[in-house]
């Protein structure tokens, strides 16, 4: 959040989610204008304060084997296209999905939340590099639009976020999109999803969008949202 320390407002939630000290694999591949070394160092410092050991997969020669030693995996934000391209080229897309679906704790923010979805089609990012496919890891059955806002800029002629999501749903009518506001996280455990923080907005094709407040529990299918 603006004016707060890196990963500031969410630290209590991170601590509760991870629990006892863990060895965590960090994925910094979304970094573009920041070096992955700097990104990993900055993130490692936060997790060390919470009692966890973080190692970055960009430094590992055999990344899939290194992932196998992790007790949790964290994917940071940046550019979703660069992130997904690298996840595919390193064969980590399938490896991370298999481990997370088997129970490995997963945390991601911004681009890291986009790749947890069925596709990265609802990212806000410019496609600065070509990806083999827009399909992502499908850890959750819905799409996420991170940093969601309904605000518009006076005098600016581009589409609002709502309009862009409406365009996506016009072509992908069966999808559900979650507009995740700043200062909001989703805690998914099995079939249960808990909204924490400022809340989210749910979009479906042909229906009015619906705001969901923080503290609400839902099913991951969002059938009750």
Image (cartoon, rainbow, N blue to C red):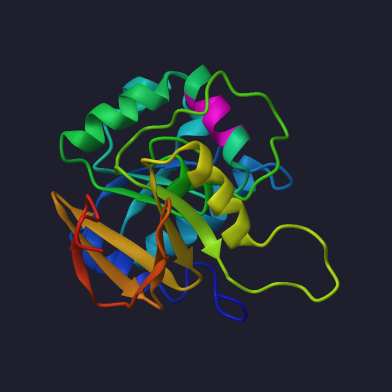
In the depicted view, which residue is nearer to us: 222 or 85?
A: 222
Seen as rendered, the residue at the extreme right is 155
Left or right of 172, for residue 151: right
Q: Main secondary structure of the magenta part?
A: helix
Q: Residue 161 at what x, y percent from top left? A: 61, 60
Task: Verify whether residue 214 appears in magenta.
Answer: no
Q: Looking at the picture, does residue 91 appear above or below residue 33?
A: above
Which quarter of the figure has residue 48?
bottom left
Q: Is residue 77 visible?
A: no
Left or right of 155, for residue 138: left
Q: Looking at the picture, does residue 64 appear above or below residue 80?
A: above
Q: Work out which quarter of the rendered image holds the C terminus and state it.
A: bottom left
Task: Verify whether residue 83 appears in magenta.
Answer: yes
Residue at 43% x, 76% y: name it.
9
Left or right of 157, for residue 144: left
Magenta span: 82-87
Left or right of 106, for residue 27: right
Residue at 61% x, 52% y: name it.
164
Q: Residue 168 at what x, y percent from top left? A: 54, 44
């Amino acid at each position: 959040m603006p004016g707060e320390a890196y990963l500031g407002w969410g630290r209590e939630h991170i601590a509760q989610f991870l629990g006892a000290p863990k060895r965590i694999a960090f994925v910094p591949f979304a970094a573009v204008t920041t070096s992955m070394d700097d990104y990993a160092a900055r993130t490692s410092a936060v997790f060390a304060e919470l009692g966890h050991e973080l190692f970055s997969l960009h430094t590992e020669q055999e990344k899939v084997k290194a992932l196998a030693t992790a007790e949790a995996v964290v994917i940071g934000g940046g550019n979703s296209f660069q992130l997904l391209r690298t996840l595919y080229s390193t064969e980590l897309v399938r490896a991370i999905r298999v481990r997370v679906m088997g129970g490995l704790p997963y945390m991601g923010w911004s681009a890291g939340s986009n790749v947890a979805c069925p596709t990265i089609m609802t990212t806000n990012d410019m496609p600065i590099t070509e990806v083999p496919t827009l399909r992502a890891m499908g850890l959750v059955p819905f799409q996420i639009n991170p940093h969601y806002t309904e605000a518009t800029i006076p005098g600016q002629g581009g589409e609002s976020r709502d309009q862009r999501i409406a365009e996506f749903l016009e072509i992908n009518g069966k999808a559900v999109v979650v507009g995740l506001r700043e200062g909001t996280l989703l805690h998914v455990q099995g079939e249960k999803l808990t909204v924490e923080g400022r809340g989210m907005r749910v979009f479906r094709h042909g229906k009015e969008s619906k705001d969901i407040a923080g503290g609400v529990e839902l099913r991951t299918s969002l059938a009750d949202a």
